[in-house]
Image (tube, rainbow, N blue to C red):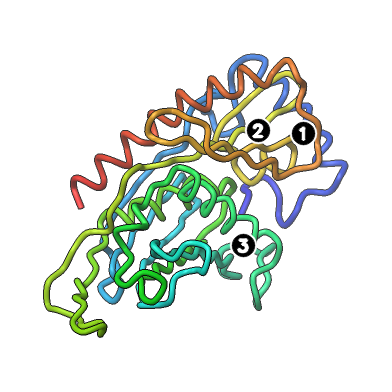
């Protein structure tokens, strides 16, 4: 919860805050004393849930996300008979924020799952062909479950990091095919990862740009943009999760900043994976 307001700020408070944030950004400052292009403190821990195939917990300041990987053997999609499958689910737990409601995922949970899915899928992060057991009949299906445990703004970037970190340290049982039957062995294998995508979320106020917005900042921004990159710095996903306009002359600068910050996040990700 914001330390500046109890509950959601009123429209009048937002207007005042909007001008205050802009004034600070003009001096490369922010309410929490970061400069415009600094992340909050980032922490990544892997394999923290024993009953999953792989897991990770990621925090950006007070925002905390946990990811767990489970698998089943299922029939491949008809249009991709030689590939395994993966599905991303995201839950915004009511205990994480007063704005999260109990019950089925709302539009924010659906949006979060889609952004994470798009980053992983468009980066071709998982070698899905290596997850096929019998063409058109049997393949690994990976379930990537995300839970927002605490929310203080920007759950996109920690969610992508948590999902990719959990996938990268996950181990799956090896199944063999005998006479058309799938038999589970005692052997294990890593999820075949080909890439390690990350996302960077930026906020825009007038002609100013900031990264990793807090909840208080999110309420006051003109626009919020999340951009995903693969390991070769190719832009693989982009999501605008606000109604405000983005000045056209800022687009190139936004992408350049996001690309540079993606390299920073990927370095943190790879360190966590090697330590996991």
Distance (Cα) linking label 2 and label 3: 20 Å
Q: Is residue 190 left or right of residue 166?
A: left
Q: Which mark is residue 203?
A: 2
Q: Residues within 10 Å of mark 3 (few under 14, many from 20)?
A: some
Distance (Cα) linking label 3 and label 1: 22 Å
- Secondary structure under badge 3? loop
The image shows residue 167 at horizontal and vertical percentages of 33, 57
Q: Which residue is mark 1?
A: 222
Measured along the vertical axis of the image, is residue 75 above or below residue 96? below
| Label 2 vs 3, first from the N-terminus | 3
The image shows residue 90 at horizontal and vertical percentages of 54, 64
Measured along the vertical axis of the image, is residue 75 above or below residue 214? below
| Label 3 vs 1, first from the N-terminus | 3
| Quadrant position of residue 232 | top left
Q: Which residue is mark 3?
A: 97
Q: Residue at x 41, y 62 (%)?
A: 67
């Amino acid at each position: 919860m914001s330390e500046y307001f109890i509950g959601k700020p009123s429209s009048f408070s937002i207007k005042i805050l909007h001008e205050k944030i802009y004034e600070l950004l003009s001096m490369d400052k922010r309410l929490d004393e970061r400069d415009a292009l600094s992340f909050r403190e980032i922490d990544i821990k892997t394999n923290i849930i024993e009953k999953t195939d792989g897991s990770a917990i990621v925090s950006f300041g007070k925002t905390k996300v946990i990811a767990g990987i489970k698998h089943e053997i299922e029939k491949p999609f008809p249009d991709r008979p030689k590939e395994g499958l993966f599905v991303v689910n995201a839950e915004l737990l009511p205990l994480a924020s007063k704005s999260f409601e109990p019950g089925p995922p709302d539009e924010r949970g659906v949006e979060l799952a889609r952004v994470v899915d798009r980053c992983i899928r468009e980066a071709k992060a998982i070698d899905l062909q290596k997850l096929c057991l019998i063409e058109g009949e049997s393949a690994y299906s990976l379930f990537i479950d995300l839970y927002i445990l605490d929310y203080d703004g920007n759950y996109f970037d920690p969610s992508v990091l948590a999902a990719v970190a959990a996938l990268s340290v996950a181990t799956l049982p090896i199944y063999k095919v005998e006479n058309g039957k799938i038999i589970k062995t005692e052997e294990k294998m890593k999820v075949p990862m080909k890439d390690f995508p990350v996302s960077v979320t930026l906020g825009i106020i007038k002609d100013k740009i900031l990264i990793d917005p807090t909840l208080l900042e999110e309420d006051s921004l003109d626009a919020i943009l999340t951009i995903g990159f693969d390991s070769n710095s190719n832009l693989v996903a982009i999501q605008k999760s606000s109604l405000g306009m983005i000045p056209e002359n800022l687009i190139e600068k936004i992408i350049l900043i996001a690309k540079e910050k993606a390299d920073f996040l990927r370095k943190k990700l790879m360190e966590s994976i090697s330590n996991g």
